[in-house]
Every structure is written in structure tokens, then in C-alpha cells.
Amino acid sequence: MTSDLRVPAARSFEAGADAYEAHRPPYPDALFDDILSRVGGSPLARILDIGAGTGRATIALASRGANVDALEPSNDMLGVLTRRVRQEGLDDRVTVRKAVFEDLSLDARYDAIVAAQSFHWTDPDTRWSRLASLLGSDGRAFLFWNAWSLDADHHDLDAVATIYAAHAPELPPDLPRDLVSRMWADGQIDAHPDVRLADRITYGWDVRMSAADYIRLLATISQYAITPAAQREGLFTALEPALGEEVHLRGTTLLLVVAKA
Ligand SMILES: C[S@@+](CC[C@H](N)C(=O)[O-])C[C@H]1O[C@@H](n2cnc3c(N)ncnc32)[C@H](O)[C@@H]1O
């Protein structure tokens, strides 16, 4: 099978888009309000969404009045994205394009560029220079990621860690971890002459779901998708009963606001 997705692990996004849309935690509404409040205050801003997936950022921004070019290489994701844009009646504000970021022509200029849990999949050698080229002079890029952990007040984290160690030691359990301090992107932004970090904002959230849905959520994550099926199923079989009926997750969304240097 040929693929537009050059990073092998990213090929996991060529299937499972419906499950992704059904089970991944959402982004906070305040995040999208903050983005648009920083884009020249214009409700008709022109925004590029890199790796739009099922359209979570695209739809949130277009619903608030923005014009969005939604860029996505996976046919499966594109199917869900296109359906959702139509269902929301946003066809006139959203242009869906099948492409990877690396293939996008640098002729266009955007008021804002968003990458929702996708910028780590782009080519590290060109990502920052391409981002700067595509931004208008006052433009901003908004790169954000969700991270979550099992709530220690509701789950036996030692038992979860033991299950992972026994069944899939190379996979990281959802134990509390620090997303707020520096991450890989901070160092790259600091080192690149074309971009600077304009702001860094975090949003806290909590979600609950059944243990079965939490297992379905884990199955949407690339690292799990590329784990051999028998090993993955062994982990899930051991993990689900250890979680109790309801899973409580504590989440953080980290937003990096990037400007041209
Ligand atoms: C974790 S999903 C995020 C989807 C969506 N932005 C969201 O927040 O729900 C990552 C997406 O990036 C896409 N992707 C991977 N490599 C890419 C690239 N080089 N250029 C553009 N999109 C890419 C994948 O196909 C996938 O849909």
C-alpha cells in the first residue's frame, strides 16, 4: 500500500477515524475562543488546520465564523471530516484538501495556522520554516496537544503500572505526568531563527467514561495501533477489570502560540 504519510507510525491514521471521533477527549471551548481572540479579532480570519483529522479544530473554528483550509492526508479521516462539515452546514467556510503539510504550496498566507495534536508528525527539518512562510506578518500559529492521566483518587495506579510492565513494557501507562514544563517543541522554537514563542497556555479538564470506552480510546493511539495485536489485546484484557466500571481522567491541553521571529 502506498501512503502520503511518510512517518510509518502516522499510517495508523489511515483507519479508525470513526473510533477516533467517538472516543478521543475533546478540546476545551475556551481554547478556540482564545485562538480567535488573538487572530486580529477578525471573525472571518483565514485559518489553515494542519492534520485536521475528523475536523475537531476545523469545525470549532468555522462554527465561530472563521474560514478554514482543512489539510488532511488520510482518506479515512477525510471521510469523517467531510461528513461532519456537511452535517454542520459549514461547507461555505471550510475547504477540505487531501495533502500533507510538506506538500502544501508556500504561496498562501494565513492569519492563523492551527495544528491540533498533529505538528509532531510533520518533517522536523522543514516544519518551522514552512510555518513562518505561511503566516501573514501578524499571523500566529497555535499548536496544541491533549494529555491525560488516570485520576489517582479513583484508580490504583500501581496496579496499572504492574499490568503494563507485564504485558507491554514499551507502552506508557496513563500515569500523572508533567505536560506544562518544556517539551520538545520549545527547544526547536528557541533554536529556529524564523519563529518565536509568543505565549504558552494550559487548560485543565476532567472526563469520565466507561472502562470499555477508555480501552477504545487507547486503541486510537498510534503507539497502541503499531503494537502487535495479540500483545495489545493481552494488555487490554488485563487492564479493563483493574480500572473499575468508570474511568476518571484528568486532562491538560497545552497551547503553544508561535509568531514569526
Ligand atoms: C492525532 S491526529 C489529530 C487530528 C485532529 N487534528 C484532532 O485534533 O483531532 C493527527 C493527524 O495528523 C495527520 N498527519 C500525519 N502526518 C501529517 C503531515 N505530515 N501533514 C499533515 N497531516 C498529517 C494524520 O493523518 C492525523 O489525522
Image (tube, rainbow, N blue to C red):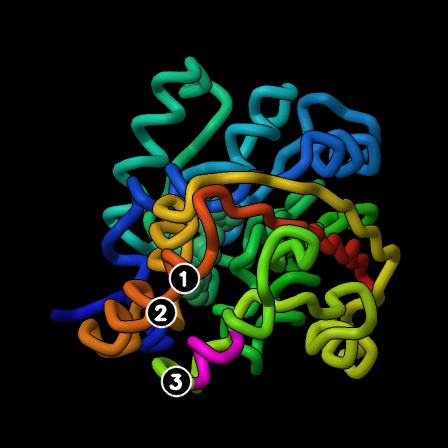
Q: Is mark 2 within 8 Å of ligand 1?
A: no
How dense is the environment of label 1, judged by Cα within 10 Å: few (below 14), some, or many (20 and up)?
some
Q: Predominant secondary structure in magenta?
A: helix
Per the rendering, the mark at residue 221 is: 1
Disc 3 under 8 Å from ligand 1? The reply is: no
- Say above or below: 80 vs 183: above
Q: Residue 191: horizontal and vertical position, in percent?
A: 79, 83
Q: Position of residue 207 (x, y in %)?
A: 60, 40
Determine if residue 100 is in view: no
Q: Quadrant of the N terminus?
A: bottom left
Tally of marks: 3
Residue under circle 3? 166
At mark 1, the secondary structure is: loop
In the foreground, 194 or 64: 64
Residue range of the region highlighted in magenta in the rendering: 161-165
Residue position marked by numbered label 2 in the rendering: 224
- 135 on left or right of 186: left
